Amino acid sequence: MTATAVTTPGSNEVLRGFKARRRTELGLMVAAAVIIASAYTLMILGSTSKVPTDVVPLLVFMLALGAVAHIANRILAPAAHPVILPICFLLNGIGYVIILRIDLATAHSYAPLQALWTASGVAVYIVTLAVIRRSRDLDRYRYLLLASGIGLLLLPMVPHLGRDIGGARLWVQLGPVQFQPVELAKIVLCIFFASYFAEKRELLSIPTVRFGNRLVLDPRPLIPIALAWGFAIGVMLLEHDIGFSGLLFALFIGMLWITTGRTSYLVLGVVLFSLGAFLAGSFFAQTHIRIEDWLDPWKYATSTGDQLVQSWFAMGTGGVGGTGLGLGYGASSIPVPQSDFIFAVIAEEMGLLGSTMIVVAFLLLVGAGLRIAQTARSEFAKLTAAGLTLIIGFQAFFIIGGIVRILPLTGITLPFVSYGGSALLANYALIAIIMRISDEGTSAVDAEDQAGFEREEERRRQLLNGE
């Protein structure tokens, strides 16, 4: 037989695939920056009836931030998913535009601080990628992470350090700086849950204890994790916050179900949630008030239900196409619109179309995160990516659901969109960890595909040569 030349793909094929992902990311980042600059121009024009003179500097600033994060991805995570960062960048930019709109309507100055927090968030993103070079490094410090998470949850309860704001004791003040330790604690506890569940997966999934004539699940592996979760929830309730308590509960049950695939855990979660909601509504004044507002906000329209009622008026005024950026009244009439109710301002001025864009962006972000979890290299990385994605998804669902009255209000901020420094920094760190897991998983898949292709080509070459 005559030998035939066969081209075997080498490492250059993989490198070209990595570069293609980064080119896609760069294009999406540029598109996001153009959308943000256009929204800014329309908002200033609607608010002041003058064409803004600083739109070019804003666009340059946004492009510079995006370029720095993009270059970091090229160097530190070249194989990572190309859609995650542009979506976060777009949400962050739209949030900045709406916060500036609120500033113009209320004579506040939140936007400059939000711009500073955004730049700091990008720095945290890069540092996280640089420090966490392998996801398995996090698995080694399981109980140190647990201790850190508990310490962060307890920090607001320290006398002269914690601050009670809006009825919840979630804040810590160090000099002129205020922050919420729970924003970082949720990430730390998620990693701990992932590490523990990954090790105990078989014991949590397969019945091994005989009860009469039947085999049932051994409850002992759940005891340490249940104690940690119960302590976290108890601390959050003592701090009079139901938002993060509900988030931690949903995260715990969600990760347990992903680990085992057993519906019984979901049923148990629903029962425990119902019991917890009943007890919290009966014995905690803040929870009771929010449930009453949820059931009949019009009864309390001039007091505790004012936020909900004003947000509904605003969203109803917006309709399908919106009143136009800079032309709504909700930015000035809704109490504290820059944090809890920023989605209502978006729904009024950008309409159903604009608010749907925000919801779709979160759906895409969650979908990409779950896809990354599927391709993760280890069980720990898979559970970590899934858990961190659940945090983003549940936060968005809780706050948007509270505004449209699917759920009681929780006081959780909308990730990347709402005003808040500690939330923004924590979310950028969260996304960086997901990107690290994505980079590892994609590199492994590409390497396996390349090796398999090379083996197939070698077999073909041997057949052609009659070997």
Image: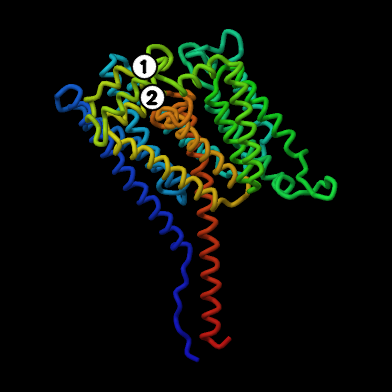
Q: Which residue is depicted at the point 61% across and 35% down?
A: 270
Badge 1 marks a residue whose secondary structure is loop
Asked if residue 46 is positioned above or below residue 155 in the image, the reply reads below
Q: Earlier in the sequence, mark 1 or mark 2?
A: 1
Q: Quadrant of the C terminus?
A: bottom right
- Residue lying at 81% horizontally and 46% vertically, measured from the top left: 209
Q: Amino acid at mark 1?
A: Pro
Query: Is 103 situated above or below 23?
Result: above
Q: Residues within 10 Å of mark 2 (few under 14, many from 20)?
A: many
Query: Is residue 60 in sight in this rendering?
Result: no
For label 1, the residue is 335
Query: Quadrant of the rendered structure where residue 56 is?
Result: top left
Q: Residues within 10 Å of mark 1 (few under 14, many from 20)?
A: some
Q: Percent x, y for residue 19?
A: 40, 54
Q: Position of residue 411 (x, y in %)?
A: 47, 23
- Tell me if I can see residue 420 in this picture: yes
Q: Are marks 1 and 2 in contact (CB under 8 Å)?
A: yes
The amino acid type found where label 2 is placed reads Phe
Along the viewing direction, whichever of 281 and 462 lies nearer the viewer: 281
**What residue is rendered at 38% in x and 39% in y?**
359
Per the image, the residue denoted by label 2 is 341
Q: Secondary structure at mark 2?
A: loop
Which residue is found at the position 14% from the left and 24% from the top?
49
Relative to 89, 280 lies left or right: right
Which residue is nearer to you in this view: 158 or 49? 49
Q: Residue furthest left?
A: 50
Q: CA distance from mark 1 to mark 2?
A: 8 Å
Where residue 406 sits in the image (x, y, percent)?
Answer: 45, 32
Please give the label number shown on residue 219: none
